[in-house]
Image (spheres, rainbow, N blue to C red):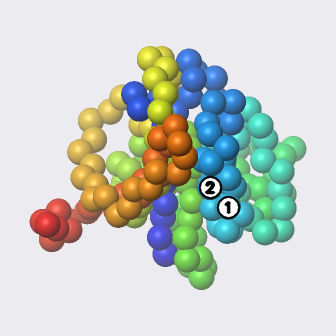
Amino acid sequence: MKTILIFVSTLDGKITKWGDPMIRSWSSQDDQDYFDAIWNDTRIIIMGSGTFRPDPVKPDSKHLFLVLTKHPDKFKSYEVPGQLEFTNESPLHLIERIKEGLEKKILIVGGAQIATAFLREQLIDELWLTFEPKIFGMGAGIVISEKLDIKLNLISCDRVNEIGTLMTKYKVLRNEREMNIK
């Protein structure tokens, strides 16, 4: 099973424009189409309640949306078992539970607290990051302010439009052997 963390970011590392969580208001159509294709091709999608709130996900039979929150009871009215669930499980426990199934990949879509928690526990296999040629100066970053030391190895980098939007994929290196890749 592969766990993929996916984000779109500005060149200065912002995943929100001045704190506004509506990414589609500033990301390119190329990135939106790419994200939609990955979203539609992935059954299990994990997000935090902050990512869920601005534009609540609609449950459907093709997906299992897992929303991490400290207060799952606050979201009971949204819950549809097997399609949209809310949990306060730790990232490690959640991944262990999912591994019991036959899933080939899991998508982690945000936000920064969720990304940090999964990275801290070394639960991310790949980071798929779209860079939009923009600078916001203010906004949320991919991770929260915490000491991390995550090493990555570039898998691919594609320029997808005339303005220079880049779609990158990185492998998360977890052990000494992986880190010595030349």
Query: Hey, what amino acid is under mark 2?
Result: Tyr
Q: Is residue 9 visible?
A: yes
Q: Position of residue 179 (x, y in %)?
A: 17, 62
Query: Image point 39% across, 28% down: which residue?
Result: 12
Q: Position of residue 38 (x, y in %)?
A: 63, 61
Query: Hey, what amino acid is under mark 1?
Result: Ala
In this view, the residue in front, 132 or 79, is 132
On screen, 25 above or below 131? above
Query: Image point 56% across, 65% down: which residue?
Result: 106
Mark 2 and mark 1: Cα distance apart in space: 5 Å
Q: How many marks?
A: 2
Q: Which residue lies furthest to the front in this view?
A: 162
Assess whether mark 1 and mark 2 are in contact (beta carbons under 8 angstroms).
Answer: yes
Circle 2 is placed at which residue position? 34
Query: Image point 67% across, 68% down: which residue?
Result: 41
Q: Which residue lies furthest to the bottom in this view?
A: 102
Secondary structure of the residue carrying numbered label 1: helix
Q: Is residue 68 visible?
A: no
In this view, the residue in front, 72 or 166, is 166
Q: In this view, does 48 lie to the left or right of 181?
A: right
Residue 92, quarter of picture = bottom left
Residue 43, quarter of picture = bottom right
Q: Of the numbered discs in the image, which one, if any, rests on residue 64? A: none
Circle 1 is placed at which residue position? 37
